[in-house]
Image (cartoon, rainbow, N blue to C red):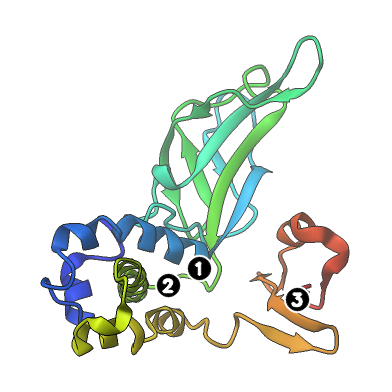
Amino acid sequence: MAYATLAKFRAVTNFTVSEILDVDVTALIADADRAVVRLTTTEFYLERLEGNIDGTNVDFRTRFRPLADTDASGTVDGSDVTVFYATFDSVTNYKEYGSSQTVTSVQDKEGIITMQTAPTTTTAEAGVFGIYRIDSPGDTSFDIYNLAACYYLGYLVAQKLRGSVNRHFSIEKELRENIVATDWLNLCYETLGLQDKLFLDDSKGFGIPGMKVNGGTNEAYCDAKGGSYCDGGYYY
């Protein structure tokens, strides 16, 4: 399953089979899906998860939520998070994460991740860590992501067709309009509610709006981008 689908793409865009074959559109779907995921989610990398490490407990919780559908499958499950049981190297004492562990289920709204095997103070002596993404705007419906991904797919198709034409104005008027007249990328942003949030400005100049999580600025993301440049919810 994917956010963008061939049927929806044909329904909401004016690209015909004579202009681009189904197989060529389908080859771009994964790229469109990844773009929408990136636009609508925020990644938290190797965050230490909450939960008892006692050889019995298998439930661990993320700091931020709701957990996002990172693979555009339409559901949030174990494939959308990665969990490591960290240990310390016996010589250097450096933290080592090893191989990822098996996740049996996920409660996305609660941020609860259930593991197949309970970690112990030996197998996870340095802690339990996760890589996950959250829905930046909150819990958004699949239909919205489906439409946005199809519009982004229209943008990718337009770029592909534009790149394959040596003399742009020598092609048919209808195809030329399909390529340039419709702002597919802007339609994607509008569908996601991002049209007014991409670039804002104030007395310091242009900036990108900071992500707000549970009413506060995403400090981890801000720090990663250069902490001192984060001010008032904006990144400069």
Q: Quadrant of the N terminus?
A: bottom left
| Mark 2 and mark 1 residues within 8 Å of each other at the beta carbon | yes
Q: Which residue is mark 1?
A: 40
Q: Which mark is residue 29?
A: none
**Gap between marks 3 and 2, in whole Å?**
23 Å
Q: Within 10 angstroms of label 1, few (less than 14), some, or many (20 or more) residues?
A: many
CA distance for labels 3 and 1: 17 Å
In the image, 167 versus 112, the foreground residue is 167
Please name the residue that numbered disc 3 is placed on.
Answer: 234
Look at 36% across and 70% down and name the residue there: 159
SS class, disc 2? loop
Residue, disc 2: 140
| Quadrant of the snapshot with the C terminus | bottom right
Q: Is residue 32 above or below residue 233?
A: above
From the top left corner, tell me how far across and down residue 158 is, in percent.
32, 74
In percent of width and height, residue 125 lies at: 70, 23
Q: Position of residue 168 (x, y in %)?
A: 31, 79
Q: Residue at x 31, y 64 (%)?
A: 3
The extreme right residue here reads 228
Sequence order check, earlier mark of 2 and 1: 1
| Residue 146: quarter of image | bottom left
Q: Nearer the viewer, mark 3 or mark 2?
A: 3
For the residue marked with disc 2, what is the amino acid? Thr
Q: Amino acid at mark 3?
A: Tyr
Q: Which residue is found at the position 62% from the left and 58% from the top?
A: 64
- Label 3 environment density (alpha carbons within 10 Å; few <14, some 14–19, many ≥20): some
Which secondary structure, mark 3? strand
Q: Nearer the viewer, mark 2 or mark 1?
A: 1
Mark 2 neighbour density, 10 Å: few (under 14) some (14–19) many (20 or more): few
- Dot 1 amino acid type: Thr
Q: Residue furthest left?
A: 18
Of the two numbered discs 3 and 2 on the same chain, state the one appearing first in sequence: 2
